[in-house]
């Protein structure tokens, strides 16, 4: 079977545990993502979200009565978007198990796609900081990250099975390093981000590949 890297413009359809959001709730939470990314946690108010969404004042508070409920819903919204991408990545990698080159290409593709949504990445960073003080918010983000760690653990196991000497690499450490790459990319100019992420992902994951064949 031939393994072909997925078209970066196509998202794989995935199932979601949470009930589908209504168009208005989705509109409000999309606006809240932008507000959080651009103004930070302190700038996330119902009024700012209404203004960003172009809605009458009081619209967002009609759906999310308190700031805490808005942040909780936003945490679900951002985490679910990331989880859907990770689930789609797992579905694609499952079609070519053990193909290390494909794994590197697919992880790089996923990260490059996330770069097209810098507000999503920045909002995730803001929510991650808030999660250090909010156990419920921390749990929302832990779920999708654990799925990503599990996938990378499979890549590491396949690499160790093919190598003469196991790498001893930790999937958790690799994900932490890849997380750092994403966050560091936000400090670069938009034109530099994709090359930086592609090169960094390749350097981090290619080292896990099987060593050269014996002469």
Image (cartoon, rainbow, N blue to C red):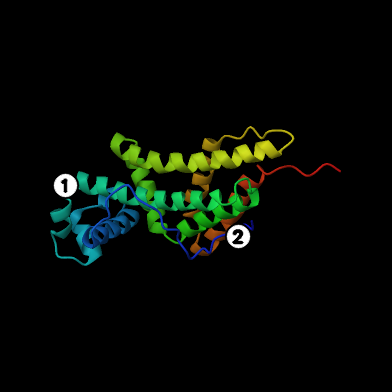
Quarter of the image where one finds residue 3 = bottom right
Q: Nearer the viewer, residue 18 or 95?
A: 95
**In the displayed structure, would residue 72 be above or below residue 50?**
above
Instruction: Give the residue displayed 44% in from the left and 42% down from the top.
Output: 145
Across and down, in percent, residue 120 comes to: 38, 55
**In the displayed structure, would residue 60 be above or below residue 137?**
below
Q: Which mark is residue 194?
A: none
Q: Nearer the viewer, residue 144 or 130?
A: 144
Q: Which residue is mark 2?
A: 4
Q: Which mark is residue 66?
A: 1
* The C terminus: image quadrant: top right
Q: Is residue 12 visible?
A: yes
Mark 2 surroundings: few (<14), some (14-19) or many (≥20) residues within 10 A: few
Across and down, in percent, residue 78 comes to: 34, 51
Across and down, in percent, residue 61 comes to: 15, 54
**In the displayed structure, would residue 113 be above or below residue 83?**
below
Across and down, in percent, residue 12 comes to: 45, 58
| 214 with respect to 184 (left or right) | right
Instruction: Give the residue displayed 22% in from the left and 49% down from the top.
Output: 70
Of labels 1 and 2, earlier in sequence is 2
Q: Nearer the viewer, residue 99 or 133?
A: 99
Instruction: Give the residue displayed 63% in from the left and 32% down from the top.
Output: 168
Mark 1 surroundings: few (<14), some (14-19) or many (≥20) residues within 10 A: some
Q: Is residue 200 visible?
A: no
Q: Secondary structure at mark 1?
A: loop
Instruction: Give the residue displayed 50% in from the left and 48% down from the top.
Output: 90
User: Which tag is nearer the camera, tag 1 or tag 2?
Assistant: 2
Q: Nearer the viewer, residue 158 or 177?
A: 158
């Amino acid at each position: 079977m031939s393994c072909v890297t997925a078209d970066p413009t196509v998202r794989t359809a995935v199932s979601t545990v949470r009930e589908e959001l209504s168009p208005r709730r989705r509109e409000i939470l999309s606006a809240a993502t932008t507000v959080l990314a651009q103004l930070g946690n302190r700038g996330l108010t119902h009024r700012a979200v209404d203004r960003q969404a172009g809605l009458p004042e009081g619209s967002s508070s009609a759906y999310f009565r308190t700031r805490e409920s808005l942040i909780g819903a936003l945490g679900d919204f951002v985490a679910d978007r990331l989880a859907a991408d990770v689930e789609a990545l797992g579905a694609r990698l499952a079609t070519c198990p053990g193909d290390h080159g494909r794994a590197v290409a697919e992880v790089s593709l996923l990260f490059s796609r996330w770069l097209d949504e810098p507000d999503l990445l920045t909002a995730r960073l803001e929510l991650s900081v808030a999660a250090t003080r909010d156990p419920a918010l921390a749990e929302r983000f832990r779920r999708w990250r654990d799925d990503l760690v599990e996938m990378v653990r499979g890549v590491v196991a396949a690499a160790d099975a093919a190598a003469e000497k196991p790498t001893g690499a930790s999937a958790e450490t690799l994900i932490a390093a890849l997380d750092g790459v994403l966050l560091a990319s936000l400090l670069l100019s938009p034109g530099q981000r994709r090359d930086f992420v592609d090169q960094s992902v390749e350097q981090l994951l290619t080292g896990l590949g099987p060593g050269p064949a014996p002469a």
